[in-house]
Each structure stands twice: as C-alpha cells, then as structure tokens.
Image (tube, helix red, strand yellow):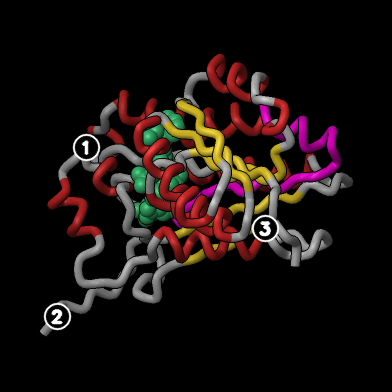
Amino acid sequence: MISVKDKIVLITGASSGIGSACARVFAGAGARLILAARRYDKLEEFAKELRKEYGCETYLISLDVRDLQQVEQVFSNLPENWQNIEILINNAGLSRGLEKLHEGSIPDWQEMIDTNVKGLLYVTRTVVPGMVKRGSGHVVNIGSIAGRAAYPGGSVYCASKAAVRAISEGLKQDLLGTPIRVTEIEPGLVETEFSIVRFHGDTDRAKKVYQDLTPLTGDDVADVVFFCVTRPAHVNISEVLVVPNDQASALLVHRHPPK
Ligand code: NDP
Ligand code: 8X3
C-alpha cells in the first residue's frame, strides 16, 4: 500500500459532497491538501475543521474550473512548497435540469459541458505536465454511471460524463510508459448537493431522488478513491462503477417505502 502522508492532493469541487469527503479521507491519512471551488467561504470554514480534526495543512483556491485563464494563473503561481501535486482529483462537476433534449435549456447545457468536460480538461492540461516532469502522480476523474448509458432528460449530463470516461481512457493511453496512474470512478446515486443543484435549488424535488432507497454517501465514494490511490505503484485501477445496493442501472432502482 502506498502512503499519502505529506503528499500533495489537489481536489476540485472540495466545498461539498464527494470532494469534501475525499478531503477528509486524505486529511485523515496525513496528506497536504489543495482545495479548490468557487465558494471560498465554505473552503475556509472546512479548512479550519480539517486543521482542528486532523492537523491538516491546506492551501485554498477560489477557482471556477470553466475559466482557463484563471486555471492557468493559479496553478502556475502556486507557492513553492505546494507545487509538487502528487494526486489530482478532478471532481468539480454538476448537472442542470432534467428536460427533454428538444426542450432543454441551452445555458444549462453550456454550464455542464464547460464544467464537466472543459473544466476537467483545463485542470488536467495544467497540472499533469508537472507530474510527467517529476515522474510521479495519479489522476482520479469523477465520472458517473451516467457516462455509461443515457437516460431520459439526462442526455447532455450523460454526454459530459461519457466524455470524462473517454478522456480518462485516452489519458491512460497517453501516459503509458510513465509512472503516472489514471483512474475513473463512476458513482451511481450519491446524496450530496448534486440534485439540489440539478433542480436549481428545489430541495423538495431533490429529496425525492433518494426517497425510499439508501443512496451512497460522499464518504462511500471517497473510500473507493482512497483505495485506488493507495494501491502499490504497479497497480492501476482504471475504472470503478460504484452504486448503492438499491440501484442496478441509472434508472433501475429499488424503492422500499417504510411500512
Ligand atoms: P455537489 O454539488 O455536492 O458538489 C459539487 C462540487 O463541484 C462543489 O464543491 C462545487 O463547488 C464544485 N463545482 C461546481 N462547479 C464548479 C466550477 N465551475 N468550478 C469549480 N468547482 C465547481 O455534488 P457531488 O459531490 O455529488 O458532485 C461531485 C462530482 O461527482 C461531480 O462531478 C458529479 O457529476 C459527480 N457525480 C455525482 C453523483 C451523485 O449522485 N451525487 C453521481 C456520480 C457522479 P462550488 O459550487 O463551491 O464551486
Ligand atoms: C449522477 C448520477 O444517475 O443522477 O452522476 O446521473 S445520476
């Protein structure tokens, strides 16, 4: 097992959900964390908690991954003791809306594609060259079960996650012959802020997504990420589909209302 003690882990979308859960797991194992998200106030509060609970050292970045200039600027100006990023967790992402494609909102599509696809590419393009130069690193991309098959109303989100799958596969091929590893994690239903964001703040509608079933938590996904990252150096877990036991495919779920 590889130790992550004192290693630098960059997590995008660390202000909530799966990203925060990953931060906690890596903090608990003694890593140093670069946490990025748009909501800087949330990161500040969270960093205090991580320091108190784990003595974790953090470097916080207010970042919109859709902004290429900002991405390039922040990662080329990291303080010297934060430059050697060992693990990149490309987690920032979102879904917007569940309308039929021919009735969908174009700004929603742009936001999903700009964040989930272009944002992930910008961060990867900016951070991975350093890993190649140092001959060391691991890229973990958070894809989704939605990247394996489309579902009604989800075509653009599903397409964005299918892109994450293809990008992860291609990156692994491009890095073949280097020690750098690439993993794509494809979660099913995870109860986070995801559905609240999808439904533009409609919390009642968001709750219904997870009603009468037991969804994954961010911690469940973070456990899997941590497992993949800490395998011996010759082992690359290329992809993991992780779903709640109450879920068999994106739409096939078992709901069991309380009696
Ligand atoms: P949350 O909404 O709880 O977290 C999303 C995170 O992404 C937030 O920290 C948010 O931070 C950040 N983010 C969104 N847009 C941007 C942006 N433009 N720039 C920087 N950060 C951004 O949802 P999850 O934790 O569930 O989602 C994390 C990832 O997991 C996403 O890629 C999602 O697609 C994927 N996923 C989620 C599943 C689920 O069922 N929940 C299942 C499968 C995959 P901020 O708003 O502060 O910028
Ligand atoms: C999130 C899971 O099924 O809501 O990626 O699209 S799903």
User: What is the number of the mark on residue 159?
Assistant: none
Q: Which residue is mark 3?
A: 229
Q: Earlier in the sequence, mark 2 or mark 1?
A: 1
User: What is the number of the mark on residue 200?
Assistant: 1
In the image, taking residue 232 as reference, residue 117 lies left or right, namely left
User: Which of the pair 218/110 is nearer the observer?
Assistant: 218
**Image quadrant where residue 109 sits:** top left
**Image quadrant where residue 238 sits:** bottom right
CA gap, disc 2 to disc 1? 28 Å
Task: Report crowding for label 3: few under 14, some 14 to 19, many 20 or more residues within 10 A (C-alpha).
Answer: many
User: Which of the pair 227/60 is nearer the observer?
Assistant: 60
Q: Position of residue 200 (x, y in %)?
A: 21, 37
Q: Given contact means CB atoms under 8 Å apart, are the residues at marks 2 and 1 in contact?
A: no
**Image quadrant where residue 102 sits:** top left
Magenta stretch contains residue 34: no
Q: Position of residue 38 (x, y in %)?
A: 40, 29
Element at badge 1?
loop
- The N terminus - image quarter: bottom right
In the image, taking residue 189 as reference, residue 230 lies left or right, namely right
Q: Position of residue 150 (x, y in %)?
A: 41, 51
Q: Which residue is mark 2?
A: 258
Residue type of the residue flagged with mark 2: Pro
CA gap, disc 3 to disc 1? 33 Å
Q: Which residues are magenta?
A: 126-147
